Amino acid sequence: MLMLKLIGQMNLQKKITMLLVLTIFIPLTLFGYLFYQSSNQFVADRTNQETIQLLHLVNQNVNRLLNEYEAQLKSVYENEDVILPLSQINRQSALEEAM
């Protein structure tokens, strides 16, 4: 009731100005809110996709490095020129500890 009295006391220029502000401001605010929500969801989805892709690449790199280390260790274990001297050193240190 008070609002109607205030509007009734306003001149025509103020009424038209208020009407224009309301017809522009409310849709613009609604559009801005909807755009914010869709952009926020897009950024969240994109971030999740990029994170999954990054983790997949890191996993591939770690697996590749581990496979390389494993191959290098196998080449050492299978190399008789390395194994024989190491086993002799091991036997000598065991004999020295026993004495």
Image: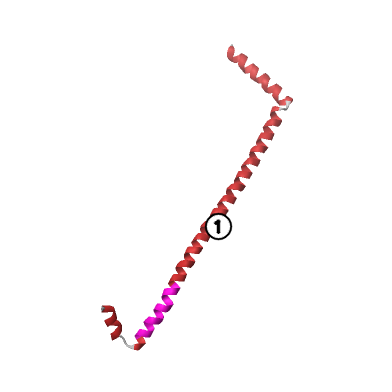
Q: Where is residue 15 in the image (x, y as percent from the top left)?
A: 35, 84
Residue drawn at x 49%, y 67% as measured from the top left: 35
Residue marked by disc 1? 46
Tell me: 2 left or right of 35. Answer: left
Residue found farthest to the bottom: 12
Give the answer, above or below, for where 70 lies relative to 23. above
Residue 66 against residue 22 in the figure, above or below: above
Mark 1 Cα-neighbour bin, 10 Å: few <14, some 14–19, many ≥20: few
Asked which quadrant contains residue 71, the reply is top right
Q: Quadrant of the C terminus?
A: top right
Q: Please state the extent of the stretch shown in magenta in the rendering.
A: 14-28
- When asked about the image quadrant of residue 82, the answer is top right
Foreground pick, 5 / 17? 5
The picture places residue 44, in percent across and down from the top left corner, at: 51, 57
> Quick check: 69 above or below 58?
above
Name the kind of residue labelled 1 in the image: Arg
Residue visible at 62% across and 42% down? 62
Q: How many labels does the image show?
A: 1
The quadrant of the image that shows the N terminus is bottom left
In the image, residue 23 lies in the stretch drawn in magenta: yes
At 50% from the left and 63% from the top, the residue drawn is 38
Task: From this view, report whether residue 92 is shown above or below residue 57.
Answer: above
**Left or right of residue 98: residue 19:** left
Q: Position of residue 52 (x, y in %)?
A: 57, 50
Left or right of residue 92, residue 24 in this image: left
Q: Is residue 50 magenta?
A: no
Left or right: where does residue 78 sit relative to residue 34? right
Q: Which residue lies furthest to the front in this view?
A: 1
The prevailing secondary structure element of the residues shown in magenta is helix
- Of 82 and 77, nearer the camera is 77
The secondary element bearing badge 1 is classed as helix
Q: Position of residue 33 (x, y in %)?
A: 45, 67
